[in-house]
Image (tube, helix red, strand yellow):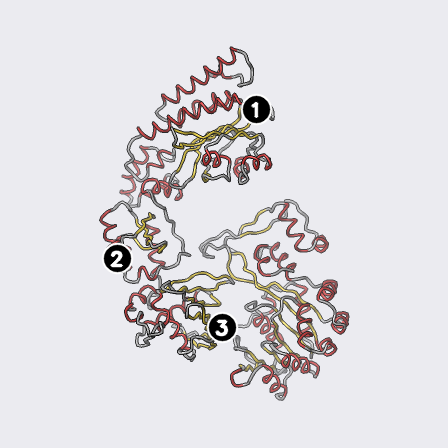
Amino acid sequence: MNDQLKSPASCSTSIDEKLRISKALQDITNRIHAAQNIKQILVDLKDGILNLFNAQSITIYVVDKLRNEIYSMFLAGGTELKEIRVPISNKSIAGYVANTGKFVNIGDAYNAAELKAIDNELTFDNSWDKKSGYRTKQILAAPIFNKKELMGVIQILNRKIGQNKFSEEEKGLLQEIAEVLGIAFYNQQRFARRRKTKFDYLISHDLLKEEELESAWDESREKKETMEKFLMNKYKISKDDIGRSYEEFYRCRFIVYNDKTVIPGDLIKNLKKDYLRRELWVPLEKKDANIHVIVDDPNNILKRDTIESLLKTKQVKYDVALSEDIIKFINLFYNSPEDEQSFTELLGKMEDEEAEVQDEDGGDVVTESDSVIMQLVNKIINDAYTRRASDIHIEPNIGKRNVEIRFRIDGDCALYQTVPFSYRAALISHIKIMCNLDITVKRMPQDGKIKFKRPTGDEIELRVATIPTQGAVEDVVMRILAKGETMPLENMGIAERNLRELINVINKPYGMILVVGPTGSGKTTTLHSALHHINTPDRKIWTAEDPVEITQYGLRQVQVQSKIGFDFAAAMRAFLRADPDVIMVGEMRDFETAKTGVEASLTGHLVFSTLHTNSAPETITRLLDMGIDPLNFADALLGILAQRLVRTLCKNCKESYHPTKEEYEEVAEAYGPEAFAKLNIPYDDKFVLCRPKGCDTCDKTGYKGRMGIHELLVGSDEMKKLIQKHATVEVMREQAIKEGMTTLLQDGIIKSIKGFTDFKQVRRVCIK
């Protein structure tokens, strides 16, 4: 047969040529019809089909109805890929053919204009080419139908001779082969043996042989291992493939364990942990009025009846998971230290009837008699502290929707837990009681503080803010002010130039030093590090803070009390009568505080403070706009340090990679082309960046911890002249850069090149 197929199909009108093509096509169709194993016969006919079209490669896709995808049943010619999957949509070529049922004949798959002429959404995914080293050019693709039912797609790739599209004759040949394949696929499905196990997908996709599966049952029982674990260990079957086998057998979703899953407290509050571990099922979430439950065997009717009885609903959607993953989910949902009750157990103790009582105005009545509420709040605070959260957000919703509790960790908010709506009033009111706020006031914002002692003996302080929101409910935000040790300046990740200049200015006998940035950017930490550097017995240092977050031996620290009139300005006036050498003011919120600070720095004192501004040059204009005298401020200014916090890459799992030319140019453009050229960092094979990957250490995020990026403006003589002239921000920024200042963005880019963070995180926190 191969001798007959050596000549390519062409437009020749030769009768002999037409007979040859017809005979070859007839031979192919006959052998497909006679085949019991379609995949095997395609392997045998591969060369014949490719010679018929004078092509380099062939790909045949079949339909996966459950996932609304097509996947490659057969790949040949120039690739070592095991499987390609694409959604049935107009975004890919094979997906477009499957979605529309139309033929596609493309001259160059990389020609975007040619693809757009077919459909605006149509693109070519060259990732398969990159993985395989193959270069796709011409594509002739046809849908495979049996009657009107889509069975798959066949693609012929790359003519061996010529740059033109496939011919109309070749299109007709492919249509005939597609029709034969449609009948063959249908017959195979109709007459295939009945699937008896949840692992038959592995056999049908040549991942496992039948005899191997049979022996695996016996061996796994002997070794007392689960079948799944045995297949993964001995035969290297991936978890994804087992998942697909499960999905095909059970006709539902396969769920993989994820430790970021939100605990469904309202669904499991009355379910016992030991029972769920024994029966291997657990509710996962409530979505669209349906409760989604993961179970080891969704086909177990008796288990389903029990589940629906316990959950008191028939609206249950069943998903499947490995038994080990189900146990992991249960442990996550009920996780707590041995001496502490779990969140779920606490919810189970609280009676709905008690919490659902409402007054005439529709507001929830709080009963503080139940100590469970107190335990619940304590649990939230303890868990937040353990997870290194900086803030706790308690967010009630309108109507009967659950209360959401979110933690801000390393600058990003993440959902921690949900609490049934019936407990929202009790929860909010108990927090108010803890920080001595008026529980009857629900229409006005309130501020307070909580001193909280953890079971370990550690004492932490929380700053609490309540804010009325839509639907006559209140949000609560609690900032954790952990009593921390002062970090040395040398360990704060400050660039060499910035560190040198900063140490130089803080050792001056008098003047003003400002640290600026948004809320939560680490300004107070930096200030205390600077004070620690100059904290010696020969210096008297006073600090006014709201609140006192970090304590240092040798500092006289004062907490302001705005409610009684003891604000920052009042504190500073008091300090000036107390023989200070150094004064630190938590924040310059108003003209009086700023004016007093400038005057103090001009009378022989070193003054530290913070401001909420975006950059160092902008700080100058902000103070001048407040009414500060430019001449006095210019004389007083020593330096302004602007900073941000960026998430750092996990040291355990971050991976290096060689970026594309486009990525390199984007980084260079953001840094400033001229300034970047001075760094002498060429684009070559040695240029690498780092990116997040994810591991257990960083909770699969790829990031762990934060570090500062800085820009330091020094009060030089030239800068003082510009301040006196009330120069614009841009002029002062240019002058500062001439004097050696790197902007926040530039400092962040340098740290991303060094592998501490990535460019994406830098872009998230700064513009210039």
The CA distance from mark 3 to mark 1 is: 70 Å
**Residue closest to the eye, 637 or 358:** 358
Does residue 201 appear to the left or right of 712 in the view shown?
Answer: left
Residue 478 % position (x, y): 46, 71
Name the quadrant of the N terminus.
top left
**Residue closest to the eye, 494 or 234:** 494
Residue 325 appears in view = yes
Query: Which residue position holds label 2?
Result: 312
Does residue 102 appear to the left or right of 328 in the view shown?
Answer: right
Residue 481's mark? 3
Three-letter amino acid code of the residue under disc 2: Lys
Badges 2 and 3: C-beta atoms under 8 Å apart? Answer: no
Does residue 327 appear to the left or right of 178 in the view shown?
Answer: left
Above or below, 14 relative to 235 = above
| Rendering quarter of residue 581 | bottom right
Helix, strand or loop at disc 3? strand
